Image (tube, coloured by chain):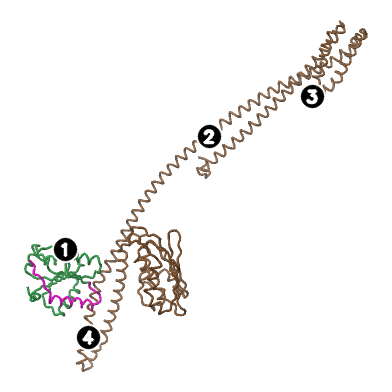
Amino acid sequence: MNTDNASLVTIVMIEDDEGHARLIERNIRRAGVTNEIIPLVSGHAALEYLLGEDGSGGVHSKRALLILLDLNLPDMSGVDILQKIKTNPHIRRSPVVVLTTTDDEREIQRCYDLGANVYITKPVNYESFANAIRQLGLFVAVMQVPAAE
Amino acid sequence: MTAQSLGLNTFQSTMLLFAAGAVLLFMLVISSFKLSSETEAQAEKIAEQRIVRMAARKTKVGLLNAETGQRGFLLTGEDIYLEPYFRGIADAKKYLGDLMENAKDRADQDRIAVIAPIVEKKLAEMAQTISLAKSGQRDEAMRIIGSDAGLNYMGVLRDNLESITERADTAVGRGLEDLSTSANRLSITTAFGSLLLISFAGLAFYIVANNTGKLQAARDSLQTLTDELEDRVRSRTEALTEANDEIQRFAYIVSHDLRAPLVNIMGFTSELESASNRLAGYFARTASDVDEAAAASIATEDIPESVSFIRKSSVKMDGLIGAILKLSREGRRELKRERVQLDELVETALASLQHQIEEAGVTVDVEPSLPSVVSDRLALSQIVGNILDNAVKYLDPRRPGEIKITFVESGGRVKLRISDNGRGVAEQDLKRIFDLFRRAGKPDRPGEGIGLAHVRSLVRALGGDVTVESKLGEGTVFTVDLPKKMSGQSPVTKEQTA
């Protein structure tokens, strides 16, 4: 794998709040990241996309995914989605960035235990938020994401 | 029962019954005593009458014997008849003396008064005839006897003595009748009293047994009630704990969910701001006519002003949500029991305020050797820290600040008093100051009205209470009342229901 691989990374954004999704996208773009961003607004839509119609996750075989995950979804807990991602043989190596308003320590710990790679608290202070996203964007530009098996 | 209709309780009626029994027994003893002493008196009287009767009879017999002896001697001249004569005289004298001594009856006494001189005369007559006979003047003696004087004397004596005997006989008969009546009365009284006593004892036994039974039943039902009450308290406590947990979760969820839209408001406000900045930059470069200048003023003044209000309000709202979140999180935190030296804790709290204390020139006076408690260290330091912070924050600028920390120890509790001479709290505000987001006095100091709400919820979590006394313009005293040993395994949520 080479650094060109970064440009092939597909960013899967699981976020029910349209405003948050838009702000995240804007800031990622501002960081100069042009990768495809797939917005998903519910837990069910997210699982359908990630695991495919057959539910095996094989649909993403050989693809590189970066998953942005909000924990507060209307139809299911983001933690459950995280667990499904990290126990699926095809997509479990995809990095997951948890983005949420919760800064509860136990929840953060739980996410890391389940295999989350980065945990970002959405600060109300927009500057910090924008910074965090932009840095994530910069990070995406150089990161090595393994393709799903 | 009549006792109940009189409004007496069981105990009172039982006591009344016992008292009545005691009175009855007393009366029975008294009347028995009286009756038996009456009987005794009657028996004594009978004995007296018998003595009188016997004395009268024996006096008569003595006189008759003496007379018989006299006559025998006079007829035969033999000395052998003098023996009964002298014995008769001795008897008559002796028994007459007894009679005089014992006769108490008025009529007897009258009769004795009559016979006593006649006895003397009779004796004198007999003695005269005996001595005449001895000196050989037997005829003269016979003449005296023949004169009938002695016969008359004897008749009077016999009549009177027999009357006394008869009267005494009658008296004895009557006395015996009375005695038997009294004895009957005594045995009837005793029997009746005994019967009454036995029934009282039976009644008392019945009442005591009955009451004991009732008492046992009452105790049983009390026990049942207590058990039920305990069950009810337990289930209520569970319900309250559940409700409290739900409130905690509610506060947590609400504050989280409120944050999500706030992120948008803040984010898009910033986007709007940067957009209007760019617009303002554009107008600054290109504005040439009046219309464009007006548009420029919108971009440079109106939009930024609105944006700044939105931002300020959002920041404030975030602060409030953060406070709720903090309180709900404190409520969910597990408390850790450990020994905490209060003087060390106060010292640390003061050290973290050192800068403000020196700047304001506050004198702090801590009572030496504050006790130690078993409690949650973090919660305690937040409680003391918040109260001290307030004391330093709300000083009265007209006088140098003084803060005093004292304590009172009593009955397993420690009262920590933190007093200041600051600006004080008005009476109508005293209740509000522990409420969330409520503040008192002039809002000239920064703050959100969280500190004391936090203090109260923490103190309650530790099983204690916090109270405030204050006079506006004079100072404030906060009293933190803590158990010396916090009860074990009590998560905050459970304690807060109390």
Q: Which residue is mark 4?
A: B277
**Foreground tag (2 vs 3):** 3
Corner quadrant of residue B405:
bottom left
Secondary structure beneath dot 2 equals: helix
Chain A appears in which tint?
green
Q: Are marks 3 and 4 on the same chain?
A: yes
| Vertical side of B111 occupied by A109: above or below | below
Q: Are marks 3 and 4 in contact (CB under 8 Å)?
A: no
Towards the viewer: B348 or B174? B348
Q: Which mark is residue A6?
A: none
Left or right relative to B476: residue B377: left
Whole-angstrom CA distance, mark 2 to mark 3, is: 52 Å
Q: Which residue is mark 1?
A: A83
* Chain appearing in brown on the rendered image: B
| Vertical side of B38 occupied by B455: above or below | below
- Neighbor class of circle 2 (other Cα within 10 Å; few <14, some 14-19, many 20+) is some
Q: Are marks 4 and 2 on the same chain?
A: yes
Q: Which residue is mark 2?
A: B201
Q: Chain of mark 3?
A: B
Mark closer to the chain start, 4 or 2: 2
Let me know if residue B490 is in the magenta part.
Answer: no
Whole-angstrom CA distance, mark 3 to mark 4, is: 153 Å
Amino acid type at circle 1 is Gln
- Neighbor class of circle 1 (other Cα within 10 Å; few <14, some 14-19, many 20+) is some
